[in-house]
Amino acid sequence: MSAAPVVGIVGSAGAYGRWLRGFLQQRMGLEVIGHDPADPHSDDPEVLLQRADVLIFSAPIRHTPALIADYVARSAGREAGRLWLDVTSVKSAPVAAMLASQAEVVGLHPMTAPPKAPTLKGRVMVVCEARLARWQPWLAQLCAALEAECVRATPAHHDQVMALVQAMVHATHLAQAGVLREYAPLLGALPALMPYRSASFELDTAIIARILSLNPAIYEDIQFGNPHVAPMLDRLLAQLQQLRQQVGQGDDAARAAFRQQMLLDNRDSQGEAVLAEGNYTFERVGYLLADLTERNAISVHLPEDRPGSLRELLHVFERHAVSLASIHSSRTPAGEVHFRVGFIAGSDPTALLAAAGEIDASGIGRVLSR
Ligand SMILES: O=C(O)C(=O)C[C@]1(C(=O)O)C=C[C@@H](O)C=C1
C-alpha cells in the first residue's frame, strides 16, 4: 500500500469519472489515470492495470459486472495487494465480480449525482468493505477527504435498502410524471398547475424534475438491475390497488378501512418521534421554498471568503434602511456559493437598488441576476 497511490478510473469520461478525477487530484493530491471508450485520448486499460494502485470502476451499472470480469481476466493476478473500488448504484453484482480478483475490494455508493461542490459534504456514501486489510487506513483517508456521511453495509443489505430508498422513490415520481402528462391535454402542463401548488406538490415536482434531468441510464438500471425491485413494485401496486378499491366502494366501511390502514396503521408504524421530526423537516423545507421563490430578494456572491464579509454586506442594507425578511446561503446552478437575501413586503425599491449598486461598486459582493 502506497501513501500516495496512483488511481486509475475506468469510465473516466463519465460524469462521476470526471468528478472523481478532479476530487482525487485537487483534494487528495493524487496522480489519476483513466480509461474511457468515449475518450480516444484516455489511457489504455493495460496502462491502468500496470500503473494503478487503486482502480475505481465508474461505469454504467448494466455493464459494470462484465467490465470488471474483463479486468479480472486481463489483470491475471497483478491486482494482488492493490485496491479495487466501484461507485455504482447497485452493489451485489459489481462487488461479487471484484471479489473474483485478488485485490482488496470495497464497493462505494455516493447517494447523490456528482455534486457541484468539490466534496460530498452533507451527502451520504454507502461503503461495502468486502475484502479490506492493508488498504484500510487509505480508505479512511478517502472517506475523510470526501467529507461524506459514510454508512457501512453489506452489498446484499445495500441492494435491499436501495429498492426502497431509490427504486420506490423514482417509481412513484415517474408514475406521477406519467399521470401529469396524461392530464396535460385536459388541465394544461405543469406551469398551469403551479399557481395551485401545495408545498408537497412543489417538492414532488422538483423531485420529478431532478430525476428527468439526470442520466436516464442510471434510473433505468436502478429499476432493472436490482432483483429486490420487482417485489417492491408488487407491494406498491397492491397498496395503490387497495386504495383504488376503497375509493371505488366509497361507503363508510371503505372509509373506515382507508383511515385504519393508510393513516392510523402507517402512523403507528412510523412512531411519534419519527413523525414529529419528519413533519418539522417538511415545515422547514416549506419555509425555505417560500423564501427561495420570493421575488423581493437579491442574491449576492461574496468574492472574499473571510470573517466579517457577511457583516459588511448586511451593513449596506442597514445604511439604506432596508429590513431583511430572510437570508440563506445557497449555490448558483454553476455551484458558486451565494447569499440570498429576502426583504420585507413593501420595501422601498429605490433603496434596494441603491444598496445593490453599493454592494457591486464597493467590491463587497457581486449581485447576481435573478
Ligand atoms: O442527486 C440526486 O438527485 C440523487 O439523489 C441521485 C440519485 C437518486 O436519485 O437516488 C441517483 C443515482 C445515485 O445512485 C444516487 C442518487
Image (cartoon, grey):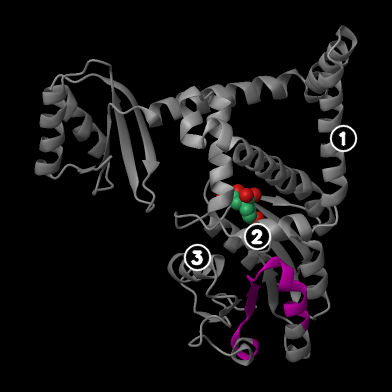
Q: Position of residue 56 (x, y in %)?
A: 64, 73
In this orientation, which residue lies closer to the viewer: 58 or 132? 58
Observer-side mark, 3 or 1, equals 1
Amino acid type, callout 2: Ile
Q: Is residue 58 left or right of residue 349?
A: right
**Residue at figure coordinates x 78%, y 48% from the top left:** 163
**Above or below 301: residue 283:** above
Outermost residue to the front: 185
Observer-side mark, 2 or 3, equals 2
Q: Residues within 10 Å of mark 2 (few under 14, many from 20)?
A: some
Q: Tell me the number on the disc at residue 205.
A: none
SS at badge 3: helix
Label 2 C-beta lies within 8 Å of the nearest ligand 1 atom? yes
Determine which residue is flagged by label 2.
218
Amino acid type, callout 3: Trp
In this orientation, which residue lies closer to the viewer: 172 or 342? 172
Determine which residue is flagged by label 1.
238
SS at badge 2: helix
Considering only order in the chain, which callout, 1 or 2, is on the residue closer to the N terminus?
A: 2
Amino acid type, callout 1: Ala
* Mark 2 → mark 3, Cα distance in angstroms: 16 Å
**Residue at figure coordinates x 52%, y 49% from the top left:** 121
**Residue at figure coordinates x 63%, y 88% from the top left:** 45
- Can see residue 369? yes
